[in-house]
Image (cartoon, rainbow, N blue to C red):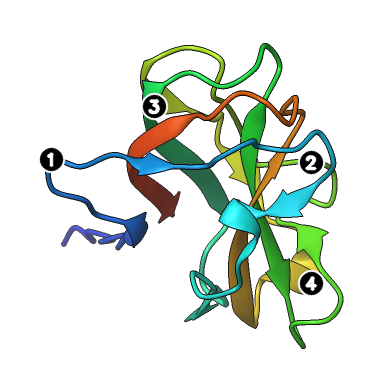
Amino acid sequence: MSWVKVLRDMVISFFQLGSAALVWTNMPAALTEFREVTVQRTKVDLTNYKSARLIVNVDTAGFAGASLRLQYSLNEADWSYLDGATGPDCDISATGVEESTWVTLEAAAKDDVYLRLVGINGDGIEDPKFGSITAQFK
């Protein structure tokens, strides 16, 4: 008798756009919630997941070194990175489909959590544009 273990990956789309790109006007250098609004936050149960990555379709590149990252919270007040460091972290300084490395979820992130997308290292002048932005969990 053989056993087959089926793993189910989860995909969360923050933005699934048609032909129009989404612009972040004057993306700041400081860590800032995506486009400086909270309406893209979502809640997801990560209890049975071990790792995550971020995939961003960059239509117009941001400032050199600019990136998008994913954070979690248990209360929407205190935010942390999913890996306890700075990841997942997706460089947006080049156009095309960019992806972060897979990061291991820290223990506290393996819960029913809120998620938000943040940006960092813009220059306050560049206006990066994005197509789809997706978080994947496995």
Which circle marks residue 19 in the picture? 1
Q: Which residue is mark 3?
A: 58
- Quick check: marks 3 and 4 in contact, CB under 8 Å? no
Q: Secondary structure at mark 4?
A: helix
Query: What is the distance, in whole Å, between disc 3 and disc 2 at their CAs?
Result: 20 Å
Q: Secondary structure at mark 2?
A: loop
Query: What is the distance, in whole Å, between disc 1 and disc 4 at their CAs?
Result: 37 Å
Q: Nearer the viewer, mark 4 or mark 2?
A: 2
Which circle marks residue 86 in the picture? 2
Q: Earlier in the sequence, mark 3 or mark 2?
A: 3
Q: Position of residue 109 (x, y in %)?
A: 71, 69
Which circle marks residue 61 in the picture? none
Looking at the image, residue 90 lies above or below residue 17: above
Q: Position of residue 42 (x, y in %)?
A: 50, 77
Query: What is the distance, in whole Å, between disc 3 and disc 4 at their CAs?
Result: 30 Å
How many numbered marks does the figure carry?
4
Q: Secondary structure at mark 3?
A: strand
Q: Nearer the viewer, mark 1 or mark 2?
A: 1
